Image (tube, helix red, strand yellow):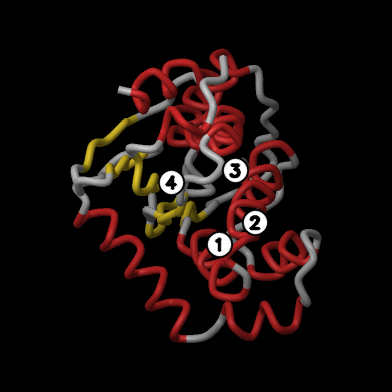
Amino acid sequence: MVFGTSSYTHLAEVIFVGDPMCSWCYGFGPELFKLRAELKGVPFSMIMGGLRDGEIFDAEKLKNHLGYWQAVHDATGLPFDATALSQEAFNYTTEPACRAVVTVRALDSSKAYAAYAALQKAFYAEGRDITREEVIAEVIASIGFDIMAFSKMFRSDAMKKATAADKQKARTYGVSSFPTLIVIDKQGHLSQIRGYKKYEELIALIKR
């Protein structure tokens, strides 16, 4: 279902708030890809919401979390590989992955979404541990960045502060769960579309 660009002349901006290590954000990826293509010409930006600051997984937490992954798989058909998550005493911190997207955004904002999607694929579909800097750097290099230049900026205090600022900005918008779309019209009115939704439902909500 395609309505054409003229259907969205009321929009000033659409902001996606998510996290590369949020399973429902991963499930939302194909719908978001189609939505971005449909809204071509409408300013689109991303805020990294910061899902987890760190949580050590034991057997019970792993079992529960894999249940969430199964629910996403059942809803979307997307592949999951639990290799990284199943490591002993895995520390589920999403700050490094979020900082990677923020760093790419600072280096070349046009590739921020590609970085986000590549990190999701690495963690969820390939079972790679994207809490580790060396893995993150390999993933970002795969989309065309110089690994040394990226790593230097990734480690900087400026990028750590920028990542924290993204998280705070999400909270300022009142976003506490992901994925969320913030839709801003040309009169400055904001609305939120929360949670996983199919492309057709998103279009119907945005076109109102």
Q: Mark 2 — residue?
A: 115
x and y percentages locating residue 18 in the rendered image: 43, 46
Which mark sits nearer the N-terminus, 1 or 3?
3
As measured in the structure, the alpha-carbon distance from the residue carrying label 1 to the one carrying label 2 is 6 Å
Please tell me whether residue 9 is drawn above or below residue 2 in the rendered image: below
* Local secondary structure at mark 1: helix
Which mark sits nearer the N-terminus, 3 or 2?
3
Please tell me whether residue 166 is drawn above or below residue 66 in the rendered image: below
27, 84: nearer the viewer: 27
Please give the name of the residue rendered at 27% of the width and 36% of the height, measured from the top-left corner. 192
Q: Say whether marks 1 and 2 touch (CB < 8 Å).
A: yes
x and y percentages locating residue 42 in the rendered image: 47, 45
Which mark sits nearer the N-terminus, 4 or 1?
4
Q: Mark 3 — residue?
A: 85
As measured in the structure, the alpha-carbon distance from the residue carrying label 1 to the one carrying label 3 is 20 Å
x and y percentages locating residue 155 in the rendered image: 56, 82
Name the quarter where the C terminus is drawn: top left
| Closer to the eye: label 3 or 2 | 2
Q: Mark 4 — residue?
A: 18
Q: Say whether marks 1 and 3 touch (CB < 8 Å).
A: no
Amino acid found under the numbered disc labelled 4: Gly
* Local secondary structure at mark 3: loop
Q: Quadrant of residue 167?
A: bottom left
Amino acid found under the numbered disc labelled 1: Val
* Local secondary structure at mark 4: strand
Residue farthest toward the front in the current orientation of the protein: 6
* Local secondary structure at mark 2: helix
